[in-house]
Image (cartoon, rainbow, N blue to C red):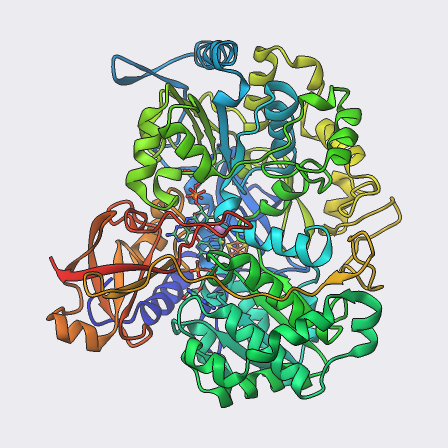
Amino acid sequence: MSAGMDRRSFLKLSLAATATVGMAGEVFATTSGQSYVSGGPAPAHVEPEQWVYSTCGFCGTGCGIEIGVKEGKPVAVRGTKGYPVNDGLLCAKGIYQWQSILASDRGRHPLVRKDGKMVQATWDEALNTMTGKFKDLIAKYGPDSIACYNTGQLAMEEFYVLGKLMRAGIGTANLDGNTRMCMASAVVGHNRSFGTDGPVGAYADIEEADVIMISGSNMAECHPILFGRVVKARAAKGTKVICIDPRMTQVSRIADIYLPIKPGSDVVLLNAMAHVVIAQGLVDRTYVDAHTSGYDALVKHLEKYTPEYAADICGVPAATIVEAALMYAKAERSLSMWVMGINQSINGTQANNAFHNLNLLQGKIGKPGCGSFSITGQPAAMAAREVGGSSTYPGYRAIANAQHREQVAALWGVDPKKLPDKSPAITEILDAAIEGKIKALWVICTNPLMSLPDQNRVRKALEKLELLVVQDAYETADTAQMAHIYLPATMWAEKSGIMVNSERRMNLLKPAVKPPGETRSDFDIIVDVARRMGYGELFPFKNTAEAFEEIKKMTKGRPNDYTGVTYERIEANKGLQWPVKDAASTGTPRLYTDGQFNTPDKKAVLWAMDPVPLPEVPSEKHPFMLNTGRVQEHYHTGTKTRKVPQLNKLVPTAYVELNPRDAERLGIEYGDQVRLTNDRGSITVKAVITAMIAPGSCFVPMHFSEGPVNALTVWAVDKFSKEPNFKQQAVQISKA
Ligand SMILES: Nc1nc2c(c(=O)[nH]1)N[C@H]1C(S)=C(S)[C@@H](COP(=O)(O)OP(=O)(O)OC[C@H]3O[C@@H](n4cnc5c(=O)[nH]c(N)nc54)[C@H](O)[C@@H]3O)O[C@H]1N2
Ligand SMILES: Nc1nc2c(c(=O)[nH]1)N[C@H]1C(S)=C(S)[C@@H](COP(=O)(O)OP(=O)(O)OC[C@H]3O[C@@H](n4cnc5c(=O)[nH]c(N)nc54)[C@H](O)[C@@H]3O)O[C@H]1N2
Ligand code: SF4
Ligand SMILES: [Mo]
């Protein structure tokens, strides 16, 4: 990043330049200055021999893509024309993603640590070493000595076989996913308000809404195609936008009302908005009486949440809170959308419930242009939730529900007593590893050394393990470098399976290109491990399509019923939104359209809630509030996007955003190296000075191992969802 140049102007220029040099795709600049690129012929002067139908491997938007292939290699990606999510458009990450497949550090062979060094091994040697150790540990310490930590980026069928292996095979409770870092608060929020998990609405609600309230979501950078739809709706029909975020973003720039609230004060703000709705007589009593429970208690509880009371806590004027509440409530169709600024909080679950409260009070659930829309992060995080990839059993069955476990055991043909009734979070799993209770950890498609809070604590836990197996696409991934056994996995364009996006749309992955070396798909590796462990009879599948047939049986009659889904029907319909109850169904855009929820009395629950205090606030010693998150050009721990030259050139290294006032006071100039410190760790990164961040706050993206922000983040979780509080911690800042 060149000093003095705004990254966004730089991004715009560079994308335009790349587009004219590299591809014939159009570049659109939206009113916000946000750029995104349409699909076009291949860059790199190579014409593909064919285009293969697929799904973007990055974010929960779930864009339809086509992979351009020549001689078995990817040479381009373009957006699928007519695909309901993105209609041919892609963001910068999407368009360049084929290059991450070709990176030179793709693992090609299994590696096993010998005398401290990783050496090439055969699959037999690597998997026999792994399963031999698993069997020894089970014999000595029981199945709970084995843990697995996975992801939201596998295919549905892979999550399914993994869950079945860990629970019905090995019988360990210790299975969790990085979805705990991400969607756990949304999942528990859905469960508490509606009875089961599952986002309610459809992206088409963006075009249908009169008002869209975007909270704790940097949609312009993290779900750019959805943001493009918001921007277009706004231009076409004057859709109003409310933005709730302590940090200015491209979303706040287009907002009609921007609420730069104090970090972590969302529950108070949303309670106050609900207070206004009640006080101004904007409640839909007919809907509330027929379809919800808890109304009287909520009304009483919200008495104290006046706009004036909230103004003090949230740091925004009472009049602005009233204005936002009325804009939202007086509109016929209003939609709430949110992501990690809400979920990754010690109050994350309650904040989710507060959105549901607000919408339920007005009967704005299951109607076009209305409702609660929790946007997902990863391309298949939904699939993990739906088929038992981590903290559920397949078909949205609950781990703690004995009846559900019996149903699953019957379908699998195993003893229900074998199925664990607990599902510890990864933070609990790692603390148990530090205590020596967990001896082996199998990490699949996630990079916890970089992405979990408190990196030093995580490193300590990983070092304590007798066996760390890392199954990753790249052998250089941070966590892979600590492994005893490394298993090379194929990537999304090299395998088949189903992904599910934020609007419950199931879409297909097809093996478009040849995987490198001896890599194997996660599906094949997991099933092979299962067979070597002696659970082969539970895994009679030759391929993912056969596993999907079993998954369908697990979901029949459940909220996420896939009975009418086949790979062919998914492609023919350009995705299918579950439930798809029979072969005639073309999917279900919205849930709860009849006001019947999945609770025992069929009513949604209104929750009366008070937030708990933040785990950490700035002090004299650590005077800055540290916020963490993402930039458009990079993905998570950077293992994929930092290998794409066009993206890495735009944002090449770790940085911290500082307000000009703070920078001046500390004698820091744009581009200086600065040190961020607290009691957990310290990082040195470049200073980017921008008024987008409030005085007293700072923001560091999570993508850079040379400035790993999780060295500083706090080990504190929401008590309902166990999701970490990634967005607020205290640090000291000085010139390095
Ligand atoms: N480019 C890119 N896109 C991605 C990803 C990526 O890594 N890179 N990852 C994908 C994944 S897995 C996810 S989960 C999503 C994440 O998507 P987002 O959640 O949109 O992204 P973040 O940058 O984590 O944080 C969102 C916003 O929350 C705000 N925030 C911080 N604290 C608070 C608070 O107390 N209250 C409120 N209301 N807001 C707050 C931050 O200032 C930030 O603007 O993105 C997905 N898309
Ligand atoms: N401070 C802070 N920390 C955060 C967040 C934050 O906002 N702030 N956000 C959290 C959130 S929402 C998320 S989702 C997590 C994400 O955190 P991670 O899951 O750790 O991030 P990724 O970089 O996506 O890790 C995926 C790994 O899988 C590998 N991989 C890619 N494709 C495949 C494949 O097909 N198979 C296999 N086996 N491996 C593959 C990649 O090389 C990479 O090493 O980070 C969390 N951590
Ligand atoms: S918005 Fe998300 S799904 Fe769409 S192209 Fe970009 S990264 Fe891929
Ligand atoms: Mo995420």
**In terms of image quadrants, where is residue 654?**
bottom left
* Residue 559 seen in render: yes
Q: Can you give x and y, in whole percent of width and height, for residue 27 in the image?
A: 47, 68
Foreground pick, 374 / 193: 193
Foreground pick, 180 / 518: 180
Q: Residue at x 54, y 38 (%)?
A: 492
Q: Is residue 404 above or below residue 676?
A: above
Specify the quadrant that holds the C terminus.
bottom left
Specify the quadrant that holds the N terminus.
bottom left
**In terms of image quadrants, where is residue 87?**
bottom right
How many marks do you count on the picture?
0
Q: Is residue 21 above or below residue 333?
A: above
Q: Is residue 180 left or right of residue 3?
A: right
Q: Can you give x and y, in whole percent of width and height, for residue 40 in the image?
A: 53, 57
**In terms of image quadrants, where is residue 449?**
top left
Q: Is residue 336 left or right of residue 21?
A: right
Q: Can you give x and y, in whole percent of width and height, for residue 103 in the image?
A: 37, 37
* Residue 369 seen in render: no
Q: Residue at x 48, y 54 (%)?
A: 95
Foreground pick, 232 / 619: 619
Q: Residue at x 63, y 28 (%)?
A: 420
Q: Residue at x 35, y 54 (%)?
A: 646
